[in-house]
Image (cartoon, rainbow, N blue to C red):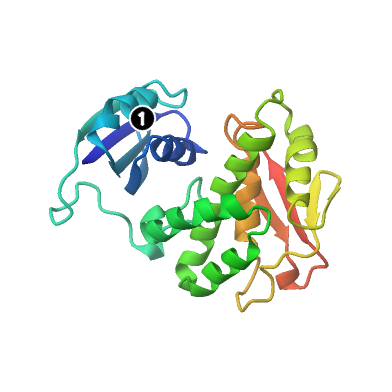
Amino acid sequence: MDIQFRVVSDRRDGLLLALGQTVIASGFNLLRQRMVNSEEGVVLTMVVRGPESGLLQLEEKLGTHHLVNSFEASPAEAPDNPAPAPARPAAAAKPAAAEVATAAMDMKRVETLLPQLARNYPNIFIQLLALEHDLPQPQRESTLRYIGQRVGAWVYKRDYALGGHLQLADAVRHIALPAMRQLLHAELHDDVLRVKNSPFCHRGEHGACCHFLRGMLGGLLAGPQGTDAVRVVESHCRNTGAESCSFEFSA
């Protein structure tokens, strides 16, 4: 069955990632989403599909989630009906905003790929580079960042969830750095994480291009994981001539 959820929250950062994980963990698929600012707060509308037998449990999880102020559920309109909240055109989307525009992604392919990455981790770059090669350029950043966020959140839950709440600098040192070292050669210099061998550089894209790594670092550190409301910026990239790809963090 298809169901539409309307959620109001005080916080935009990490909202879609956290609630999307709850939806998927409950056996549902996220079909489409829209997030806007309103007088009530941040309004996230999600249309999901899954078994009717799991609906009450999913509604309870979403309704009691610590990021959710209010919650409503209603039957979703059929796909051929006019949508109450059409997605913005791709040209108007801003992937650097708090969450990526999932309407621009091939979500079926993403959801198929994620379990494969979990099985093969940390040997995941062949699959990621193959996906990057196939993606249309406008979808590349948003899709790879979203996958990175999901992988980072999974690695945090697997390896670091039992640790205490850390300040940002400590979370970078004790969570982000060792997690990144499972994949690549990474160093920390004055709270800037540097990667010397990112496989995403010099592959025909202009500008900074390590979108998966930036998303993964955000997934490792954002929300209730490690520290709150983390912003990750790739300040330097080998793709633009730098000696290494540098990631800076702010909260």
Which residue is tagged 1? 8
What secondary structure is marked by label 1? strand
Locate the C terminus by quadrant. top right
Q: Which amino acid type is shown beneath numbered disc 1? A: Val
Residue 74 visible in the picture: yes
Q: Describe residue 134's horizontal placement relative to residue 120 as left or right.
A: left
Question: Based on the displayed image, in which of its 4 quarters is residue 240 positioned?
Answer: bottom right
Coordinates of residue 232 in the picture (x, y in percent): 65, 48
Coordinates of residue 132 in the picture (x, y in percent): 54, 69
As drawn, 127 above or below 44 = below
Residue 251 visible in the picture: no
Locate the N terminus by quadrant. top left
Q: Residue at x 48, y 32 (%)?
A: 11
As drawn, 12 above or below 240 = above
Q: Residue at x 43, y 53 (%)?
A: 111
Question: Based on the displayed image, in which of its 4 quarters is residue 207 positioned?
Answer: bottom right
Within-10-Å neighbours for mark 1: few <14, some 14–19, many 20+: many
How many labels sit on residues?
Answer: 1
Q: Residue at x 60, y 57 (%)?
A: 212
Comparing 95 with 80, the one in front is: 80
Coordinates of residue 125 in the picture (x, y in percent): 64, 63
Q: Describe residue 190's horizontal placement relative to residue 245 as left or right.
A: right
Comparing 24 with 213, the one in front is: 24
Question: Based on the displayed image, in which of its 4 quarters is residue 176 positioned?
Answer: top right
As drawn, 98 above or below 228 = below
